[in-house]
Image (spheres, rainbow, N blue to C red):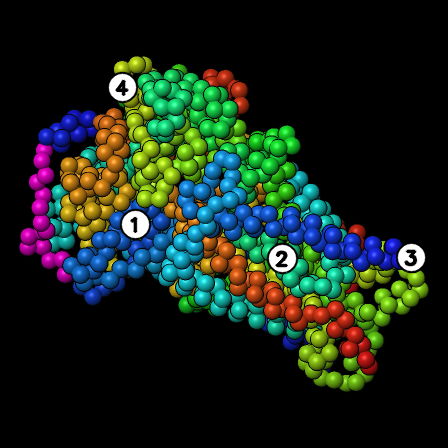
Amino acid sequence: MTNRKRIKELILPYIVSIIAIILTLIPIYWLLITSLKKKKDSFTRPPKFIFEPTFENFIKVWNNDFYAQTIFNSLLITLIGIIISIFIALLCAYGLKRYKIKFKSAFMKWLLVAYMLPEFLFVLPMYSIYQSLGIYDTHFGLALMYQVHVLPFSIWMLRSFFDEIPSEIDDAALIDGCRPLTTLFKIYVPIVIPGIVATSVLNAIWMWNELAIAIGLTFSEAHPVTLGISQFRGYASIDWGGMTASSVIALVPLILFSLFAQKHIVKGLTLGSVKA
Amino acid sequence: MSRHIGYLFIAPAFVILFFTSIYPVAFSFYFSFFDWNWGNQENFIGLDNYLFLLTDPEFWTVIYNTFVFASVSCFLEVTIGIILAIFVDRIVFCSTVIRTILILPLMVSGIIVSMISKIMFNNLFGVIPYGLKQIDIRSSFFGSTEAAMPTLIGVDVWWQTSFVFIIILAALQGIPNDTVEAAKIDGASEWDITRFIRLPLIKPIIFLVIIFRSIDTLKIFDLVWGITGGGPGISTEVVQTYSYRMAFGFLEMSKSMTVMVIFSMVVFTLILIYSKFEGKSDE
Amino acid sequence: MLSKLFSIFFSISLLFVGSASAFDWKAHSGKTITFLMSEHPVLKGIRSVLPDFERDTGIKVKVNAMAEDVYFDKMEVALRSGKGVADVHFCPMDSTAFNQYLAGLLEPLDQFIFDSNQTSSSYDIADFPDGFLQSTRFPGGPGSNHYCIPASFESYILFYNKNHVNKYLGGKVPETFDDLIFAANKVKKMSNGDVMGMVVRGKRTDTAIDTITGVVYNSWGSRSVNYPQNIWFEDGWQSPQMDHPAIQRGLAQYAGLMSAGPDDIKAYDWNEAGTAFQQNLSAFFVDASLFGPWFEEADSPSKGNVGYAVLPPQVKGGKSYTAHWQWGLGMPANAPEKGAAWYFIQYMTNKMNEPKIGAFHGGAARMSTWSNNVYTKTLNPDYVSATLESMKTTRSSVVMKEGWSKYALEIVDTIHRIHGGEAALQSGQKANSKFLNYNK
């Protein structure tokens, strides 16, 4: 390979990434600067790129008790939701891969049906069940309902990632006679960490931003952050500063989680586990 | 012994999904045969709802809109997502930061994406028409029947490509290094490696991404409801906004559920066809 | 009828002072109630009075509030809940409440209002104009019961940007409706599209129906408005008259307003339109009077620059007409604490507190409030006079029909068709056949 080609190959990814980053960040940037603008600068013609920034919106949102409570609620709900989904999906995907299950195909398709259903259709039937079971308006109840969407996705994801595992490892594990749970957690899981991370991040994002089921199945105790942000949309008035600032703040936990989760994927980590 | 252990592994998932999905599905299916108005009216009308919808041109327009939106968005998102993932996979410097930035769009909630899009595309005070005016391109974007759907698709592509990106990237990162190294020593170029080693290896993941993205785009609600409300006219009305409006707007609960039953059957059939075509399904 | 009442109240001075006499406000002391509400200026007012309420009655209140669209969904689900979750809710007094009444979800309130043990003698329900109370009574006619108490109303008026009117129209506010459309287009042209002539709701949503009704009423003029069919049906549900000349004109005029706006007007809901006007990007804005307080907020770019007027009449010097819409405080039929809930509703709508709450939203429902200084002193005087003026000839936009939203959406579609170039007559006839279809 010529040097020129090698340099091109090295630089091209960065060029593509930079273009992608710029396109990605334009709306985010606009979200951010709207939250830093005073009311008079928010919507001018032509749009203002240079203005006097203010933190008043952030301060107002930060001091808003209801909003703070919804952030806490969402953290708890999402955490419970991820733990449940990943743990159960791991068990399920492993079982599907390693053992003969009679209705495997039908089960996988049922997962898609559950995933396919629109959220607002769940609210009505589940409302009374939730009230009678006492899990209405609870963090656990909401995290449980969210499984109807994140669990099928997690199971499919983890199964596909498990499928990628080279068969030598599979056979080696079987021969070794490891107990099933050990094989799962000591051998399989480390290999599919990137898959687990991607699934967790996507699940977290989905649950964090969910609204329809939250409206139906919470009342006051377990309001997630999507409802916290919605309080800045008034009647015959919108608090653009409050809305954008609260959305920006709501992004932070997700960003932190994503950074944290991805630190655990380093390219080539998988090398180590291909040892028999 | 080992036969039964397998069932134990899938039992928790089975139980949870049974609890959360069977009853709602049965509930909707049951009520699709009534004329329930979420109040005291609850008469059995058999297949009337189905007949009404299947012979209503508006219903078919909505289905058409939904498929147009889904196919174009899904295609663009999968393609761009995979290409992006292939490139970012090769980055070593600041890769965590770059990756996180690229999934930022997905982290913004649907309602906020809608509000920001409306602002940014607004002809009076939006930054996008302002920029495009400098190069002499004008459009009414969400205010015109022709431009609304493409603009919506554009917004969804911005928003959801990250979904494809993060999954494909994770799959690529799981490819053992020695295979790649060996090929490089043999003199293969990056493009060759990608074409002949990487992509085939992650085929099941690509299949998964296509299925889930398809379902997600067919299910689209937040963006359409928040930005155009199905308008102008019904140029952007999709199945879920149509059904939601019936349920919460007109209180035609039963009809709304019928829409979802019909649509779910259509989507499910397509998935079945696609699985057979792929030959992979879930073996 | 309404105009007579209002001309009377102008000559009545402030009468009511002080609190109730021997009425026991503490009868439900110790209880807790939940108030389900949308983020609304009324809520701001109620929040300011809440500490007084809790002190005077010993009842604790949990406020559960959210954006309006979220609230609507929540309200519908909560009202149908097996186990009641709310004791008082914010009631949209139109077909929504009517449908809820039909489904048995609302608690009738006469049992409280006319019980001297539960309602203070100074409450005086007749202080609410009968036109307002009419929308709270179901099924309508003799033997009806009240199902909510009016909390606020909004009438549809014209807002104008003083600077732009001075700059482009020589300071002259249009005197007829067609003039308004002409003037708006003029502003748009003269400013090269930098300033819009008009902003209104142009998005395809049935929630625009009330604003639209205001404009159409202005064309309907002095003809009578009969309920429950309102003007859209001639005589009974089977005779829609969307092609009636007056209605045609009204719908066409609304479409004309849209045309004087930005070319993506069909993407404008009230928040885009309101925001554009608040940011001084439009000369005119037609919508609910309740926008006034938002435009006059301390840091609002439009503060001090907004003019208020009734909708210009059809002919110069003629009478202007408009519609109004109301919010009320209602009690879910499944409310756990009905007695305490009634105390809350009563307190927040009585003569002492309505002015305090009204200062936040500018749409007080009681006649006595409009001559109460506590209320009027905080509001922009032009706003007060324009709204009062509109109150003289306003009629309710309500249509008490099950599933009315569907018809309302078709009315919006009719306007959009006219805006797209279709003749009003044809468009109206299409709407008629759609209505008959829906009737089946």
The residues colored magenta run C12-27
Above or below, B24 relative to A272: above
C122 sits left or right of C286 in the view? left
Q: Amino acid at mark 1?
A: Leu
Above or below, C118 relative to C2: below
Q: Residues within 10 Å of mark 2 (few under 14, many from 20)?
A: some
The residue pinned by badge 2 equals B101
Residue C26 on the magenta segment: yes
Q: Residues within 10 Å of mark 3 (few under 14, many from 20)?
A: few
Identify the element where label 4 is drawn: loop
Q: Residues within 10 Å of mark 1 (few under 14, many from 20)?
A: some
Q: Which marked residue is nearer to the observer: mark 2 or mark 3?
A: 3
Where's residue C1, x and y in %?
A: 19, 26
The residue pinned by badge 3 equals A2
Where's residue C303, x and y in %?
A: 33, 38
Tell me, yes or no, if residue C348 can be seen here. Answer: yes
| Residue toward you, B256 or A221 | A221
| Residue toward you, B260 or B161 | B161
Where's residue C439, x and y in %?
A: 44, 31
Q: Which marked residue is nearer to the observer: mark 2 or mark 4?
A: 2
- Label 4 in the same subunit as label 1: yes
Rounded to the nearest angstrom, the CA distance separating label 4 from label 3 is 86 Å
Rounded to the nearest angstrom, the CA distance separating label 3 from label 1 is 72 Å
